[in-house]
Image (tube, rainbow, N blue to C red):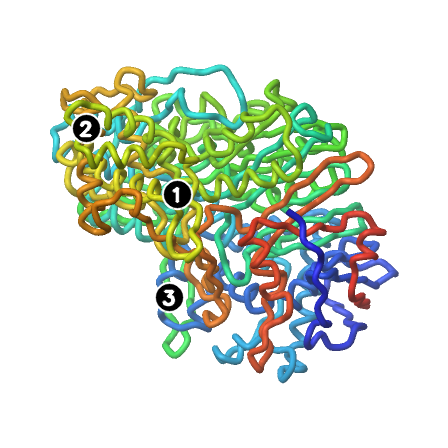
Amino acid sequence: MLTSPRRFPSRLGLGLLTTSLLLAACATTPPADRSVTIKRDHYGTPHIYADSTYGLFYGYAYAVATDRLYQMEIAKRSGWGTVAEVLGPDFLELDKVTHTNIDPDSIRQQLAALSNEDRAMFEGYAAGFTQRVREVKAQPDTLMPKEFLDKGFEPTEWQPEDIAMVWVGLILNRFFAGTAEVANLNLLETLKADQGAERGEQLYKQLRWLNDPTAPTIIPQPEVKTALADLPRHLQALSSQAAQDYLHKQALALGPTVAAGTPTASNAWLLGPAKTTHGHAVLYNGPQQGWYTPSITYSVGLHGAGYDLTGSTAVALPAILFGTNGQIAWGSTVGSLDTNDVYQLRLKEGDPHRYWYNNAWRPMEHKQVRIKVRGQDDVMLDVYRAAQGYVSSWDQKNNTAYANRRSWEGREIETLLGWAHAAKARNWEEFMAQAARVSASITWFYADTKNNIGAAALGLLPQRPARQAIQFPAAGDGSMEWQGFLSFDHNPKILNPQQAYIASWNNKAYSALLADNSNFSYVDRVQELLAPLQAKQRLSDEEIWGIDSLGARSDLNARYFVPFIQEAAQLPHASALARQAAEQLKGWDYKLHVSNDGKHYEGSAPAIMQAWMHAAVPVFLQGRLPDSIYKTYTQNLYPAMDDPRSAQPAAAAKLIWNAIQGPAAGVPQTIDFLQGRPAPELVLEALEKAVVHLQKLQGAQPAQWRAPAVSMLFAARNAIGVPWSDPAYEHRVTPYLNTGSAHFQYVMDPSGVRMCSIMPPGQSGFINPKGQADPHYSDQLDMFASFKCKRDAISASDIDSASETTQTLHY
């Protein structure tokens, strides 16, 4: 599992080890000791030492700008909607969508209202980043990242609100802004038009359910049965053109991999002392925020001003999202609580900027935004806002518009600070006090050196009116406004569950959860984590780390259908070829092991399972659904070459599972997808079609059939498609691994917390003007591909032992 640290020459182009800068304009006066020390270890990870909050984040940002200057410039522009200014008109549409999702004035007001101590975090960060930008501009021949020279623009200096806009633009507006309400309405309208109103509604309930009590949950609670989906009786029609426009803009804003619903990002498992061989609690976290070059994640140690942590965080945020302070460890996976709503506005005939609200026609708020476009004239964008939020889409045919409301709007900075200050907590109570500040939907995980483990579903929950159908847009006339918010006491939490472990792979947070955008089902990839957790009474550190390799290499559909395939092959009329294929499935562990040639998966079982799945979709679903709806269920059954998604069981697999279960399904099967036939008959029909297909392509011997191994790409574009590095330096790994963009494991030994991590491709993203990449650009990639990790220093003495360079800054 572990590797010996490798040593590299000093970073190219660091410049002088001692630098100085006075920023007189800073609103928070730094203390008298204006020095910062940066110690870097064998993998380039910086540990920052300073006596003040300002100095600590000054040094942190200086290190970030040294390692990731171009990436962070693009991240900032992605948040502000100023990408087209430097990369041209191809990004104008993205910038327009960005400006309909952000309120810079609100962000500035939130920053201005902070205490001096909290504001020092943002001001110190801006000053440290700006210091490095000025150094780079002064020595462009050696320090300027190659991408700036290639694209013909320079890095910009930073202000306190810039890092806040990175947080809003690439984190909140991506991982926490999704909703399927318009997509659900479009689905319902399509089904009713094709099948008639009654059957269309019945079919909708089988495709989009509110709750399935058989779905595994993160936080154990008694099972709760829930009524079928409530359907809207208050809405005007939605035109297909308007639906496509809304979903297209949502894909631009959120990134195409998460636009359809809750992001499928990150996993975690925690073990109490009764589940580990050494008797200490363990927390493992694998954030799946996407695979990029450079990594979206940045590793750092912060020491001073109340902080003493080693951890990592997305796009170098001030809040360290995954880490340990030597007494507790923390991590997270994207949550599933419903904190977002869409409102359908009824517009005044002939005046599309007035909407009916509280029994009167009300004008929308309006502002104009100037967008600079490289090589073209500036573009003026009209941005409109209703009482509920920014208007994102218009339906001219039906004289309606759609506005988005999120419970975290106006609380963006408070949410970030809750996450930042959680790193100072020393126990569960202090950790939960910070959790209560977080308005975005996220699941937090906790372990400490006193052998406690816990989880909590975070997010500010709206108090909605009883008549609102949460799966669909709310009426924008004032009758469905939120009636305040529920207190944090309503958020599900668990400390030291009886089962002595907790597992999450973005599955349902708790049994009573109702959400508009997640068909939580018994068919869930978290089963791949639960299986090894339940297989042994106690697990070693190596076995706990190894759970990731089991999940990452799993065929996510096989667990549910292989037993049915084997059973169906025993039917009297099964062909000899079908029986032979079923024999190949015996003893398969449902994992995708790569053969020696590196091009295929070992054995014939993966090929048979994939072929069966592709054949089963038409056997079970074709003709039961409108063609346009059916087509969506034929897609994404398995990861494709360089697939950017974190893979899930196929959406069709959930429908097929429910159909096979019949009356035992967690979702009532009002419409019989089996069409009166026994389930084994359809399973066999799909198997016969699959083996004929494989025979035609690969010959008559099932033992020789093979499925191709696909690769994974560490992309040079960020989550919303903006290039943030040179694509010539992208990395690929074969095979595709359904794993984290980074991995962290914390063993909570009271005598000293042990941390093991990996963050591919590497800590640095710097490519010098001559095209030479930093030694730490991809030095963690091989370990990632082989499921190894590096030891991370936590204590002061260990950090000193691991340090290869020391740098002192004076500000």
* Label 2 neighbour load within 10 Å: few <14, some 14-19, many 20+: some
Q: Are marks 1 and 2 in contact (CB under 8 Å)?
A: no
* Label 3 neighbour load within 10 Å: few <14, some 14-19, many 20+: many
Give coordinates of residue 670: x percent, y percent: 21, 20
Above or below, comparing residue 462 to residue 636 in the picture: above
Is 472 placed left or right of 71 in the picture? Answer: left
Above or below, comparing residue 609 to residue 774 in the picture: above
Residue drawn where x is 56% and y is 33% of the image = 458
Is 32 placed left or right of 266 in the picture? Answer: right
Is 532 placed left or right of 309 in the picture? Answer: left
Please state which of residues 464 and 598 is positioned toward the viewer in this rendering.
Answer: 598
Q: Which residue is mark 2?
A: 682
Label 2 residue SS: helix
Mark nearest the camera among 1 and 3 is 3
Q: Is residue 266 visible?
A: yes
Residue drawn where x is 75% and y is 62% of the image = 40
Q: Earlier in the sequence, mark 1 or mark 3?
A: 3
Q: Are marks 1 and 3 in contact (CB under 8 Å)?
A: no
Mark nearest the camera among 2 and 3 is 2
Give coordinates of residue 770: x percent, y percent: 57, 82
Residue drawn where x is 24% and y is 48% of the image = 242
Label 1 residue SS: strand
Mark nearest the camera among 1 and 2 is 2
Residue furthest out toward the bottom: 141
Find residue 749 and report its image quarter: top right
* Label 1 neighbour load within 10 Å: few <14, some 14-19, many 20+: many
Label 3 residue SS: helix
> Residue 404, labelled with which disc?
1
Q: Which residue is mark 3?
A: 92
User: Which amino acid does the dot numbered 2 rest on?
Assistant: Leu
